[in-house]
Amino acid sequence: MTRRRVGLFLTEEEKFDVIIVGAGPAGSACAYILAREGKSVLVIERGDTPGAKNVTGGRLYTYALELLDQGLHEEAALERKVIREQIMMLSGDRAITIDYHDPSFNEEGRPPMSYTILRGVFDEWLAGKAEEMGAMVACGIRVDELIERDGRIVGVVAGEDEMYADVVIAADGVNSFMAQRAGLIEDIKAETVAVGIKEVIELPAKTIEERFNLREGQGAARLILGCTEGIHGGGFLYTNKDSISLGCVFMPEEAGQKKKSVHEIFQDVKMHPSIYPLIEGGETIEYGAHLVSEAGFRGIPKKLFREGFLMVGDAAGFVINTGYSIRGIDLAIVSGIAAARAVIGAEGTAAAGPLYMEELKKIKLLPTMQAQDGFSDILETAWLYDKVPDLAADVFENLFTVTGEVPGSVKKDVMRLIRSNDLSAWQFIKLGFKGMRAL
């Protein structure tokens, strides 16, 4: 699809209804609805194409697309329907994998619950759908500044161009430059974000299906614990049509204390005896790194708007990490929908912000994030990331080891293994209480 550079808009009379900075899922979803409802919309994207600057694991829950437009998932640029939910724990060369297989996730008569996606492909498709509705998408343009008049945001500056709008929407990702310029957030704090590294490894579809016990079109989503050398974080693996997305996410401050580089830690994951056979023979076709918000509900800025300005998606901190599931793309789309509804329903720019907050509640985004906020307390437990995988592997080794000797008491063996991993039963009891309070 050919996209053109916008012309000059040097007066406030020659303005758009809405300018959106960022053509990721949040920005494009917002533009889709606004343009469909007759608003004049300009989406400005820094990358050469939508999705060119984005790095993510690559999973989308379909309810978000259905909220955007019913039946939209049927034509979307999706990869595989996820029917296998997997959790893997690594300890040295050992591994434990829990595989939950549910055919109902792909049941006839309703949309599959989730798909794997490739962001470059999906973002380009969604931006194209916004264009079909009438939005203008301008790529390869960096926004340098916001334009303010009498305390209200009225436009943006990109190079020598000034472009005006009734509302500017920041969809420019984590550590949003636009939100900083609007005075709504400060520079990001290291303890609130993680560094995500991902490779896309090309493999034949049949090979992927054989290695993951899948049928044509079916996919698996795997989260990995114990792969970050004790650093808060974990890994992920998603099966695409003809490739595998493999990555790690961990806290940068802790990574800096290790003797190995971030890249070296990731390479160790790739070469693990339980990971390498899954990607063996594949060719890396994409490599990238990105900051990921880790604070969940607590990381949402105190204020998401000011007159003439709204924040959506990663810019607003809309990411959930429960340890067994990571959600961001669906929340980005939902926040874009909420912002569009607020702009359409507002009478004057001053009303858009408060209405946006109401829409975030109505559409269940804020309640969902608040309901799962307690997982942050659990995930702050440092020994989850090394001692728990080690203990789990020791317990399984003890269960499956047969030497001909009389086996001991399982209870006594487990207590012995807990002590040998420098843990105590009391620590697990306290974690249990913390989990009950959190959940």
Image: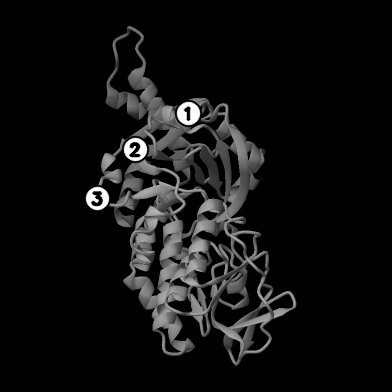
Give coordinates of residue 339: x percent, y percent.
44, 74
Lower position in the chain sequence, tag 3 or tag 1: 3
Q: Which mark is residue 128?
A: none
Q: Nearer the viewer, residue 237 or 304?
A: 237
Q: Is residue 189 above or below residue 417?
A: below
- Residue at the spot 45% in from the left edge and 45% down from the top edge: 79
Q: Which residue is labeled 1 in the image? A: 207
Residue 153, above or below 47 = below
> Callout 2: few (<14), some (14-19), or many (20+) C-alpha neighbours within 10 Å?
few
Residues at discs 2 and 3 in contact (Cβ within 8 Å): no
Q: Judging from the image, what secondary structure is the residue with disc 3 in? A: loop
Q: Rate crowding at label 1 as few (under 14), some (14 to 19) or many (20 or more) other CA atoms within 10 Å.
A: some
Q: Residue at x 37, y 75 (%)?
A: 359
Measured Cα–Cα span from mark 1 to mark 2? 43 Å
Marks 3 and 1: which is nearer the front? 3
Query: At numbered mark 1, what does the secondary structure look like: helix, strand or loop?
Result: helix
- Circle 2 sits on which residue? 425
Q: Position of residue 292 (x, y in %)?
A: 54, 55
What residue would you read off at disc 3?
A: 109
Q: Residue at x 69, y 80 (%)?
A: 8
**As drawn, which residue projects farthest toward the top?**
404
Give the colour scheme shown.
Answer: one colour
Helix, strand or loop at label 2? It is helix
Three-letter amino acid code at disc 2? Ala
Q: Quadrant of the N terminus?
A: bottom right
Q: Gap between marks 2 and 3, in whole Å?
A: 47 Å
Residue that appears at 57% across and 37% down: 201
Sequence-wise first label, 2 or 3: 3
